[in-house]
Image (spheres, helix red, strand yellow):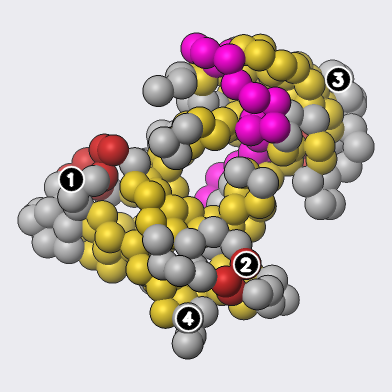
Amino acid sequence: QVQLVQSGAEVKKPGASVKVSCKASGYIFTSYYIHWVRQAPGQGLEWMGMINPSGGSTDYAQKFQGRVTMTRDKSTSTLYMDLSSLRSEDTAVYYCARDQLLSFDLWGQGTLVTVSS
Amino acid sequence: EIVLTQSPGTLSLSPGERATLSCRASQSVSSSYLAWYQQKPGQAPRLVIYGASSRATGIPDRFSGSGSGTDFTLTISRLEPEDFAVYYCQQYGSSPQYTFGQGTKLEIK
């Protein structure tokens, strides 16, 4: 069925990097942009950026410029979000979400990233 | 950056009642670019309304969206037990930039 399945929870130390994956299935991979959205514990939703799976072009929220990299592997229909120089404030659930008419119609189940020394 | 402010922060109602949730933008937003999401504890958000007034696939018709410019509303005509959740509005702006409101918690009274 149509779904986005994300990788499992991660625990990282401050200063490290984390790479979260998001595998798409059930639809044409290259036809929909994918966004990454995060949610800190007990907080709201924060948009991080987006990738065009077809050509690989990206747009990042200014807050994350220089620290985030979004990539894709067309051979496996998988998207990746790499966040570097982690700090405690990056502790959050990270979601991938499919773009439909500038809203997000399909979401992954979320990946908890915990940053702790 | 466009800021979305949702009100009230918490709304306490009983099943069967009508819920009205507000989302106000700091600048005018194209109606095509305003969406609403429902999120239950431990779950990913779920798209409810897109384009300010179009229901997403599988969303019952007790949900409706309206508004334009800077003021948008999500209405649930008769609350069912499964409707109690947190609701977020979201807009798309140029750059590109996507922003969310801080959320309204709809709780059972």
Q: Mark 2: which amino acid? A: Ser
Above-or-below relation of A78 to A76: above
Residue B54, image quadrant: top right
Foreground mark, 1 or 2, reads 2
The circle drawn on residue A88 is 1
Q: Mark 2 packing: few (<14 Cα in 10 Å), some, or many (20+)?
A: few
Sequence-wise, which precedes: disc 1 or disc 2? 2
- Residue B28: x %, y % from top left: 58, 15
Q: Which residue is mark 2?
A: A31
Magenta stretch, main secondary structure class: strand
Q: Report crowding for label 1: few under 14, some 14 to 19, many 20 or more residues within 10 A (C-alpha).
A: some
Q: Earlier in the sequence, mark 4 or mark 1?
A: 4
Q: Residue B20 location, x and y as percent?
A: 75, 17
* Disc 4: CA contacts within 10 A as few (<14), some (14-19) or many (>=20): some
Disc 3 crowd, CA 10 A, few/some/many (<14, 14-19, 20+): few
Circle nearer the viewer, 1 or 3:
1
Q: How many angstroms separate mark 1 from mark 3 (CA)?
A: 41 Å
- The residue that mark 3 highlights is B17
- The numbered mark, 2 or 4, whose residue comes first in the sequence reads 2
Q: Which residues are magenta?
A: B24-43
Q: Residue furthest bottom?
A: A75
Q: Which percent across, then down, holds residue A63?
A: 26, 38
Callout in the foreground (2, 3): 2
- The answer to which quarter of the image holds residue A2 is bottom right
- Is the residue under label 4 in contact with that under label 2 (CB below 8 Å)? no
Chain at tag 1:
A
Q: Nearer the viewer, residue B75 or B92?
A: B92
Callout 1: SS: helix
Give, as a three-letter code, the residue at label 3: Glu
Q: In the rendered structure, the residue with mark 4 lies on which chain?
A: A
User: Label 3, label 4: how many angstroms apart (C-alpha)?
Assistant: 48 Å
